[in-house]
Image (tube, grey):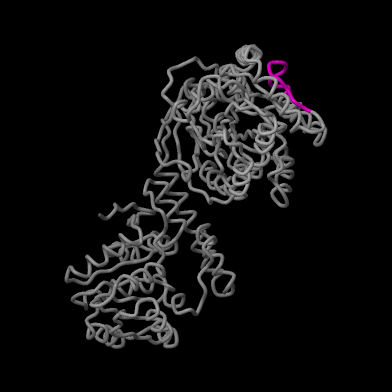
Amino acid sequence: MSRPSIPILGLPLACETYESAWRRCEELARAGRAAAVSACNTHIVSSARQNADFGLVMSRFDMVVPDGTPLKWILNARGAGLPDRVYGPYLMRHAIRHAPHPWKHFFFGGSPECLANLEKAVRTIQPDFQLVGSFSPPFGNWTEEENTAFCARIAEQDPDFVWVALGGVRQETWIIRNLHRFKRGVFFAVGDAFELLAGHRPFAPDWIQRAGLTWLYRLLQEPSRLWFRYFKYNSMFLLQMLGEIIFVNRRFRGKRPAGRLRLCFLGARGTPARYAGFETVVEELGSRLAERGHEVTVYNRSNHYRERPAVHRGMDIFYVPTVMFRSLETIFHSSLCALHAAVQPYDLVYLCGVGNASLARWLRWFGKKVVINVDGIDFKRSKWTGFARWWLYKSEIWGLRFADRLIADNRQVVRHYQANHGADPVYLSYGANAVSPGVDAGHLARFGLESRGYLLFVSRLSPENEAHLLLEAHAASGVTLPLVVVGPVGYEKAYFERLKKLAAPHVIFTGPLYGGAYRELSRHCLLFVLPSAIEATRLVLLDQMGFGNAILFRESAATREVIDDAGRAFDGPDPRVALASALKELTGDPAACRALGDKALARARSEYSWDRVTDQYEALFGEMLPTLNAPGRP
């Protein structure tokens, strides 16, 4: 069945795959009338919005499919669920493979040499392909007599499918203005499909296409011819989309009581929390601010959320796509969100992560107050090298220069800024949720586990979190209790393969767990192990303290600041040996584990309260925005 259409800038785009789009084309061919199909990119969408006459042309197409990756992103952000775009050259190739005799085809456009090579290419793809004619019209404008002759030449062959490659806008206009001359046949506007399939130009590599950078690949091939076109139409499309977002997707509630603010969180993956620390901060802090009457918006990365509710725990959720590349995912998404946030009536923007600091200048140009939570000394983390590390170090300087406030979650981070930048970030730690026993739902049995009969590790499986150290120590310790490893793999596929080779038979990789499954496995573990020494406040550590778990951690100043003496540390010249010894000792003394768990829970309750953290944030925002309490503020 055909999927519904979703409009982008007023032009309905069919949410089709290559297979379903081709089925619709076959149905149109059997209908016994002339029909029109366009593989449409951002240039076409933008031109249809900009030019009313061309907009009318595009409205008469029977089907318009999203040729460009950015269009696919936008459609998916609106719930389309498309696995891929429907790229014109690939759609044509798909049709050639799946349209043997008796379907008849005609090629219109391209140079004589291109058409000759295209005919050879299609024969290799589909030997039974029935090409009844092809024609290369002269370059330039045609007289009415010439155009009539071209149409007569096509109609004489009575094709089922006519593939038209005259260049964007011109080919769509030609099809619609001449469709009445034909009794039947499906006319395709396919852009540069002839050149690509004929082998006159290479296709952009797959990773470039997935990143939405095919235009850049083409620009590098023909910069003098294409730079102005791309500059004009890409810029126009972005501005038009921004305008549509501003005026169509605004969900503000009108007047609000004095003392209440409008703020947004951007830079994290989003909410509900599905990944790591920042997502928990956004959910716990944002929901409490919403409960207190503030208007809170969270920008989610739509790529990470299949279910996309508009509201979660009182927070408005706005879904924006991103590119799924490790070094680009966050800054690309944050940049798109900052473009949107800059023109919204937010009082304050909360940026998650120092790597987004460069965006603070843009946001302040538009009158926004900006808070950046720097989340540790990011540039020192082992996962970053080269340009990414340089960027994160420079971002510390940009954050101090451009943001209204920098927030550090740990006093070690405050001391780093004092020593290296002569600056004092605001210290605001996180909260911990003290978790009641609750009702189990069978997740222990699902993994073959018994209460207090296993060890637990929870974190993203990347080298800096040092799961390998724990696996090596676990194997060396002789401890036979299962080790449960909970966490997503993300971009670290090779590292995960290494972990699987290190794992003893009683190591269980559960993958990422959320909600009830995560809580159940956390509540029943004998011992939680934190083998890394990242200088930041780890939300997973606070989580496990709130579960009342015994915690074995690698000695570091930042972690010691959080847990104090409510956990057991390991350290030494050979951390693997020290960890193995500590594992053996603690697993042999359940009473000591229970005592450590009680101390951890007591410290979580006394020192880490999300309600108190929210009070502190409200006080900080009040200092930054004293006019919030002015009477009559809209």
Q: Residue at x 45, y 36 (%)?
A: 317
Residue interval drawn in magenta: 560-571
Is 435 placed above or below 343 here? above
Foreground residue, 104 or 530?
530
In the rendered view, does 472 fall on the left or right side of 263?
A: right
Image quadrant holding the N terminus, namely: bottom left
In the rendered view, does 157 fall on the left or right side of 255?
A: left
Q: How many marks?
A: 0
In the rendered view, does 197 fall on the left or right side of 29?
A: right
Query: Is residue 128 within the magenta segment?
Result: no
Foreground residue, 533 or 197?
533
Q: Is residue 634 visible?
A: no
Is 437 placed above or below 465 here? above
Residue furthest to the left in view is 32
Q: In the image, residue 367 lies at what x, y percent? A: 59, 38
Foreground residue, 205 or 491?
491
Is 551 placed above or below 513 here? above
Q: In the image, residue 607 lies at what x, y percent? A: 65, 15
Q: Residue at x 40, y 51 (%)?
A: 75
In the rendered view, does 396 fall on the left or right side of 53?
A: right
Query: Is residue 562 within the magenta segment?
Result: yes
Q: Is residue 449 visible?
A: yes
Q: In the image, residue 214 lies at what x, y percent? A: 52, 64
